[in-house]
Image (tube, rainbow, N blue to C red):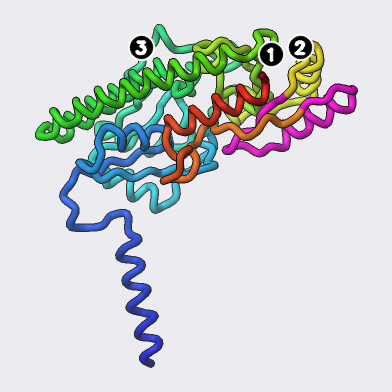
Amino acid sequence: MKFRTGILVMLLFISFCGSPDTEGDSRPYVVATTGMVRDAAEQIGGDLFRIDGIMGPGVDPHLYRATPADIRRMERADLLLYNGLLLEGRLAEILDRIGSRSFAVASAVPDSLLMAPYEYGGNYDPHIWFDVTLWKYAVNGIADQLSALAPEHEDAIRLRNEAYQKELDELHSYVVAQIASIPEERRVLITAHDAFGYFGRAYGMQVEGLQGISTTSEYGLQDVRMMRDLIIERKIPAIFVETSISSRSIESLITGTQESGFMVNIGGELYSDALGAYGTETGTYIGMFRHNADQITSALR
Ligand SMILES: [Zn+2]
């Protein structure tokens, strides 16, 4: 009997502590969809806000559907931050419903800087975080939203944002230098889906994805053949898998290319649409970006 009571108390304790809606915290409640957006909110808002993220490591935002717990969080949020440009395609309904309390960080990026690739039906490419100069606009937009939510913290938010913008400038210079160290003819980035269009434009790489901009589309044999020919023609030593996408397509491309007598290898795992584990180096935007740049550089150089 005593044992059972112990378990019951423990369960109550766990459910109380595990609740995302912990009462008694008077700070404004901010919920972010992707890891990139959550990290930006944390860098700028620090512990002035209570910040929750919806999508963890390895989660594909193109396909993600909200759980009942996510919906509760989003409905309770004083501010819901999301990427926008249809990245979170399957959250459209709830984002619509929450409306006035939500902010698409991509809306802070000037339209003239966005890419609208033909293959994406004239829609804008949502992967804006892969050009640091574009992401800086998004971070500024988040800073404005946080200031509007808690005007008493405006000065602190401004200072934190200024410091973080400097770190982002340093990151941008680092990536420019890293990619420039790869011989020019090998600056080709082949991945499972087209997450790196902005990266290619900003840092001078040709970018090819097997699966298109959104993972909701399929790839065909024709795509695999074209990519194989490109790898052989340009003697590309490595292609990359992504943490948020099955590696099957990239593995079949490797097999196909090797059967044609050219050795291509997996150049490592890139973070495309999700960060690494929370609390680790790649669990931050800057750590994730540096990891990708280092991985690409060492595999292709
Ligand atoms: Zn994507």
Q: Is residue 248 above or below residue 230?
A: below
Q: Nearer the viewer, residue 131 or 7?
A: 131
Residue 197 drawn at (x, y percent): 55, 17
Judging by the rendered image, the residue that carries numbered circle 3 is 110
- Marks 3, 2: nearer the viewer: 2
18 is higher (above) or lower (below) than 241: below
Mark 1 vs 2: CB contact within 8 A: yes
Quadrant of the displayed image that contains ligand 1: top right
Q: Would you say the beta carbon of the disc 1 residue lies within 8 angstroms of ligand 1?
A: no
Check disc 1 and give the amino acid type.
Arg
Q: Which residues make up the magenta segment?
A: 238-264
Between residue 31 and residue 143, name the one nearer to us.
143
Verify whether residue 255 appears in magenta.
yes
Left or right, residue 177 beside residue 261: left
Q: Is residue 205 left or right of residue 105?
A: right
Viewer-proximal residue among 219 and 135: 135
Could you classify mark 3 by the number of other residues whose Cα lies within 10 Å: few (under 14), some (14-19), or many (20 or more)? few
Percent x, y of residue 113: 42, 9
Q: Amino acid at mark 2?
A: Arg
Q: What's the amino acid at mark 3?
A: Pro
Q: CA distance from mark 3 to mark 1?
A: 31 Å
The circle drawn on residue 170 is none
In the picture, the quarter occupied by the N terminus is bottom left
As helix, strand or loop, the secondary structure at mark 2 comes to helix
Judge whether 110 appears above or below 211 on screen.
above
- Image position, residue 258 (x, y; %): 85, 27
Query: Which residue in the protein does label 2 denote?
Result: 234
